[in-house]
Amino acid sequence: MIDLNLQYKNLIETLKSQIPFQPEIGLILGSGLGEFAEETKIVKTFATDELPNYPQSTVQGHKGFIHFAELHSKKLLIYQGRIHPYEGYSIQECVLPVFIAHQLGVKKIILTNAAGGLNHLQPADLMLITSMNTFNIKNELAKLIGFATTEMRKRFFDFPSTNINSLIQKAALAEMVPLKEGIYWYSTGPSYETKAEIRMTQKLGGDAVGMSTVHEAIYASTLGMEVGAISCITNYAAGISPNKLNHNEVMETAELVKEKFEKLVKKIIELL
Ligand code: HPA
């Protein structure tokens, strides 16, 4: 079993000695929401490359900052930038943001990401994640969590949280932001999928594919946090449209969606 308490003791102590407040809500920003922190009142920022042992993101559009911020009088812990398994990091390293959030007392966490759309999803849609595919990941996470106790086994499938999801739907209605729903399918990357993989995903029930979020959600839920997750559909998944996929398209669509995505997340925070 891997003990994150031991591995990141120094990091947690460094943070705890310098944080301005205990955060209540965590937010991990994916592409499309990368600049959301600017919409909040930032109280203190840590650059992740100055934190001991913090893995660095290598992906364009993923800055490495941790912000302590306020919005609607809620105290937020915002991760601007994410570390992904496809960058060569282990699942155990990739859940570090969630581990830190838990250590600092966060009870609710909202995860966002960019994803390729299938079925009823199109570029520029926002998708509330109603469930996730977790092939291959639970085993890796079990090394962190230890033997699954009955209590943990129950939690393992309690994500995304029903409470948070209905609140996200309420926020979307209040702001008149169209919000589709669907199942997020984890794809290991680092390349986008092949057409055959997407056909398989479609047959097995996936609505959007992406390379993050699932491990964060499972781990957060296992630690007892309430989890909500939203995908920004940045492109058609491979083979759905004749166009060849690339990261620029993902970034361009994310930019187009930014405003409505920010509006939605602000309202979610207000309602949480
Ligand atoms: N596949 C996997 N990850 C992604 C995609 C995709 O099509 N778009 C954005 N992230």
Image (spheres, rainbow, N blue to C red):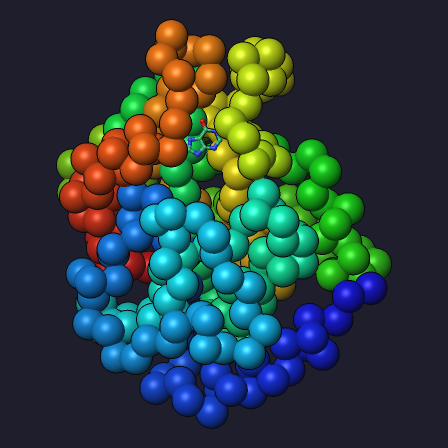
Up/down of 212 relative to 240, above or below: below
The reply to whether residue 2 is visible in this rendering is: yes
Q: Residue at x 19, y 72 (%)?
A: 41
In what quadrant does ligand 1 lie?
A: top left
**Left or right side of 242 for 134:** right
- In the rendered structure, the answer to whether residue 221 lies left or right of residue 231 reads right
- Residue 243 vs 76, above or below: the answer is above
Which residue is outermost to the top? 242
Compare residues 157 and 40 and report the one nearer the observer: 40
Say if 127 sits above or below 198 in the image. below
* Residue 168 percent location from the top left of the image: 33, 45
Which x, y percent locates residue 271?
27, 57
The C terminus lies in quadrant: bottom left
Residue 65: x %, y % from top left: 37, 67
Residue 75 appears in the rendering:
no
Residue 224 lies in quadrant: bottom right
Indicate the quadrant containing the N terminus: top left, top right, bottom left or bottom right: bottom right
- Residue at image position (57%, 34%) is 189
Residue occupying the point 38% across, 53% down: 62
- Drawn side of residue 228 relative to residue 11, left or right: left
Of residues 36 and 173, which is closer to you in this image? Answer: 36
Choose between 16 and 147: the one closer to the eye: 16
Across the whole image, how many numbered discs are drawn on residues? Answer: 0
Q: In front: 80, or 76?
A: 80
Point out residue 6 in the picture as x, y percentages from the top left corner: 72, 79
Say which quarter of the image contains residue 176.
top left
Residue at figure coordinates x 49%, y 34% from the top left: 210
